[in-house]
Image (tube, rainbow, N blue to C red):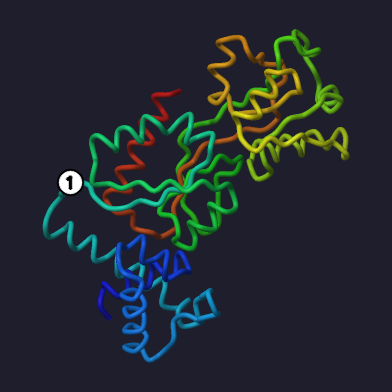
Amino acid sequence: MELRLLATFEKVSAVLSFTRAAAELNYAQSSVTSQIRALEDSLGVELFDRLGSRIRLTEAGERLLPYARQLRELAEEARVAVTGPQEPSGTLAVGTMESLTSYRLPPLLELFHHRYPKVRLSLRPTLGDETRQALRQGTYDLGFLMEAETEHPGLEAEVLAVEPLALVASPRHALAGKEPTTADLVRQPLLATEPGCAYRDLFERELKSADPDVQFMEFGTIEATKRAAAAGLGISLLPEVTVAAELAEGTLLRLAWEPPFTLRTQLAWRAGKRLPAHARLFLEQARRLVAEQG
């Protein structure tokens, strides 16, 4: 089995599309198709079920996938051991989220752009369960999580920081200057991003302990949610880093309510995966920059 064919097989398995795999590998689609067919011929089995415009792994393909990953990772280790360290290079598919991409990651992205130009970062916006699943399947190399839990089946994770949360509202809000209880909050209009954000889901669970029928106005993005809160439409729980500028300017006010849960920003990868040099570099720099941000 040629390593080139196994690498193509791994990519098609990750994205479940010959077209997407060809684009990401910079191949013609016909080349991807012929490589997969050559691998199937050499093994004497079909690795994918072709279902019209969709494909999925066969049972044989599922069995081959972990071996393909291990062989590729071992080949990279062997190359580094023989040739020695080189300038970091390669592609990293990184699962992330708005709160991190917009407010924590810009210095990290700038660092890689200027200092490590041969490392191509592909940021994939997903949340929680979707990120974890993509890491297990190998679609993502690394993934940022903002969760209360630090143990994730099938994954390894490093905690980068505790992520402070702030309950914010307009400075003219009725709860300004008071110490509201959870029961007080459920009587207020509540603003939120989409379900799937751990802080939104945990906040909703806490409020439903006081009122099972609690409802949120959903705004989709953090920026839209902040604007709605500043306009006096309600209150919202958001990561402190996302509202720091508004709190400093006075367009938003932090209410005196502390959430009874703690979120931790983490960087995760598939358990047992040998991280290549450029992935280890990304982890090291993420760890350093998040620590510097405090």
Q: Is residue 151 above or below residue 226?
A: below
Q: Split into 4 quadrants, where in the image is the N terminus?
A: bottom left
Q: In which quarter of the image is the C terminus?
A: top left
- In the rendered view, tell whether residue 154 sits above or below residue 171: below
Task: Tell me if 207 is positioned left or right of 89 in this view.
Answer: right
Task: Identify the residue at horizontal 49%, vertical 41% (top origin).
Answer: 266
Q: In this view, does 216 lie above or below 7?
A: above
Residue type highlighted by circle 1 = Glu
Looking at the image, residue 84 sits to the left or right of residue 284; the answer is left
Q: Position of residue 62 (x, y in %)?
A: 48, 76
The residue singled out by tag 1 in the image is 87
In the shown orientation, is residue 56 left or right of residue 257? Answer: left
Taking the view exactly as shown, the residue that stands out farthest to the left is: 83
Kind of element beneath mark 1: loop
Dividing the picture into quadrants, the one containing residue 46 is bottom left
Q: In this view, does 75 lie to the left or right of 68?
A: left
In the rendered image, the vertical position of residue 248 relative to residue 292, given as above or below? above
Image coords of residue 171 (percent x, y): 70, 10
Q: Which of 13 and 19 is in front in this view?
A: 19
Front residue of this view, candidates 270 and 144: 144
* Residue at 11%, 57% in the rendered image: 83
